[in-house]
Amino acid sequence: MVEETKFDWVPFYEEFARKLLVYEHDRTELIVKLEEIFARGIKKPKLEKDGYIRDVDPFTVFAIFNKSSFSLDNRLKIIAAFKEVFDIKAPLPTALEGVPLLFSMMANYYYYFGNRGEHDIDKLWTLFRIARELSEKDSEALREEFKQAFDIVLTLPGIKNPKATMGLFWVAPTRFLSLDRNNQNYLLRSGNVPKEVVGENLALGQKISGADYLALLDRLFVFFQNPQSPVRDFKELSARAYESIDESESDGIRYWIYAPGEHADHWEEFCNLGIMGLGWEELGDLSQYRSQNAINNKLRELNPDKSSKQVAHMPWQFANVIKPGDIVFAKFGRTKIIGRGVVTGEYEWDESRKIYNNVRSVEWTHKGEWTFPDPSLQLPYKALPTKTLTDYTPYTEMVESLEALFEIDDHGGDPPPAPSTEEVYDKDSFLSDVYMTEDDYDELHELLLHKQNLILQGAPGVGKTYAAKRLAYAFMGVKDPTRVMSVQFHQSYSYEDFIMGYRPTANGFELRYGAFYSFCKKAEEDPENPYFCVIDEINRGNISKIFGELFMLLESDKRGHSLQLLYANEKFSIPSNIYVIGTMNTADRSLAMIDYALRRRFAFFQMTPGFDSEGFKRNLETLNSTKFNSLISMIKELNDAIAQDDALGKGFCIGHSFFCTSDGSEESLIRIIRHEIVPLLEEYWFDETDKVAVWRDQLFDSIARS
């Protein structure tokens, strides 16, 4: 049984839920408190399309610190801010064992303003209030109110049982159970809960009513009193469900994309029989092969021209990797999902079939036609894979969006439009964020357009990395981090890290793909949109070694050309929609000049301090600090001296980003000078201590005399 100490989050969650009750009819004050939390450095979620919060429901408020994209430390940091702002007396949790999490892109319980119904948020508040009352006092009258409110909420767009019950569990974890995917699998597949307790109305992906939900909870309450029950309450059940996944030898449930025959021509048959079938009949019973290599050898024997390890991978996975409880999404082509099912049986060789003798039993929970991916969501892949069988488990965003199709619509057909997560980012956005002139931006845009590879070089603190990512967003037209890969090169970074290589495992070595290889594959699936690889400190790595045989393919006119990879029997190319932006610190004495081969493949842009840019001037006006203005004037004089120094030059000038976090106060300015600027000058003029002392005194004096 899970130790009680792991559930010290319960008092906090319950007290916070009670605090929220007072805001049901005063949501303006609740929004003020949320804005206070965000002002403390907590990242503001996108609660409305334009960022202006007009209204909010309690479940969405809870979701702010219950998202799958946050680490435990980040969630506890957010909870600490809520504790202070809402004056929560319960101790700050130390662990969040068994708390289910929502996919970040679907954490709102309502659609954005203009797309939601007039009373959608009111309906969510009503369910919240009744649920809290029912958790403290059980009565038939409250039960009837709960059933009605629950069923009404399930009619709201984007809300189905997993999401609704997850919110109920957050606000009253001793009274309600989340019916998220993990908990449902525990109830249905683990064997720890008798079928008569689970009942007939609970099935993966299926909708249950408020009456069915309460009846299930009642049966579980009784079961918890049984000495045979491995858990004693809902929080323990949830923790055990997640724990069982963590302890699984195959890392829990896997998710598969599957083509039921060529052009899905066996879909109806497989649906009616409750199976999924795979070809390669010439291999015979797949259970006779002890390794993937054995299948490959057999394929080579049968047809030398078509054998490959990649082909052998699919029958091996079908027979040995797929397991009962895994989720299968049936596809037609590359843009249609036609069904969803749960694997219920082990691999079988069915001699009675003429074709597709390799079978597994599947409970097909859904049948219909869904467009995928939903164009309103920003997802890393824009089309389904071409292979007959693909393990999609590593692509968590895609899995969540696939499952969301069936949470939104239980009866087939296209789901209703989800709230747009796309944030427009254009030239004006860039110039507002990055202290650079409009002419410089136009030049950067042209360099990227024609060269596709760009290096931003400059002195410390000119904001090279910050500018690189925002340049990518401006070029794309949207702020879409899924199309931007960031990596930092260093002396130990290698081809095996970046492209592919063998890594040690418990049983030997395994070929694993590197960051750039995977990113290129992602870009291949979405040829109409640009993708950006941002390489920080590009000159710190051995470029020729890291890119290996792909170094040649970096040239813009070589994009799309294929080369044989070093570690794999595979032709690989860098897609034409891949752009590379590197950053390089020109003041780093420890690095040798980069070679001509790299210079020929990249355009270079010298970034300079942005003290004279319109953006920085606006920042000065906003701060309205004479001390800050005086210090910046002195920094500009210092930069003139650095630029005229024969041993240094413009590439060593001090950048504006040293000062971007200052609030203009004397304390913050002194801290920047003492701990950031002076140490840099001591490195620049390590053999001219008198010059360092002169400039140090002038910098401090510029603050003191203003």
Image (cartoon, rainbow, N blue to C red):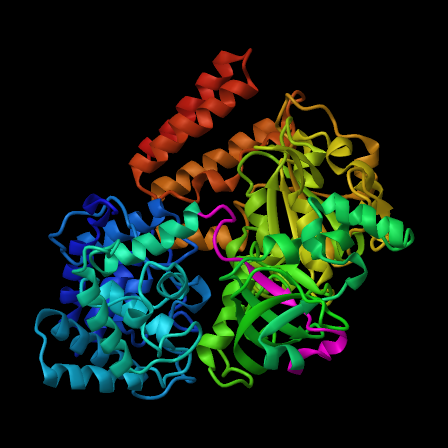
Give me the residue at 88% from left, 49% from top: 301
Q: In the picture provided, is 675 more to the left or to the right than 98?
A: right
Q: In the picture provided, is 358 more to the left or to the right than 14?
A: right
Is residue 98 within the magenta segment?
A: no
Residue 43 placement (x, y as % from top left) = 38, 56
Please tell me whether residue 587 is drawn above or below residue 285 in the rendered image: above
Is residue 252 within the magenta segment?
A: yes
Task: Please count the marks in the image.
Answer: 0
Query: Magenta residues?
Result: 248-268
Quadrant position of residue 675: top left
Give me the residue at 60% from left, 42% from top: 487
Residue 278 placement (x, y as % from top left) = 70, 66
Viewer can see residue 370:
no
Name the one closer to the observer, 641 or 648: 648
Residue 657 placement (x, y as % from top left) = 49, 42
Quadrant position of residue 294: top right
Q: In the picture provided, is 414 more to the left or to the right than 534?
A: left
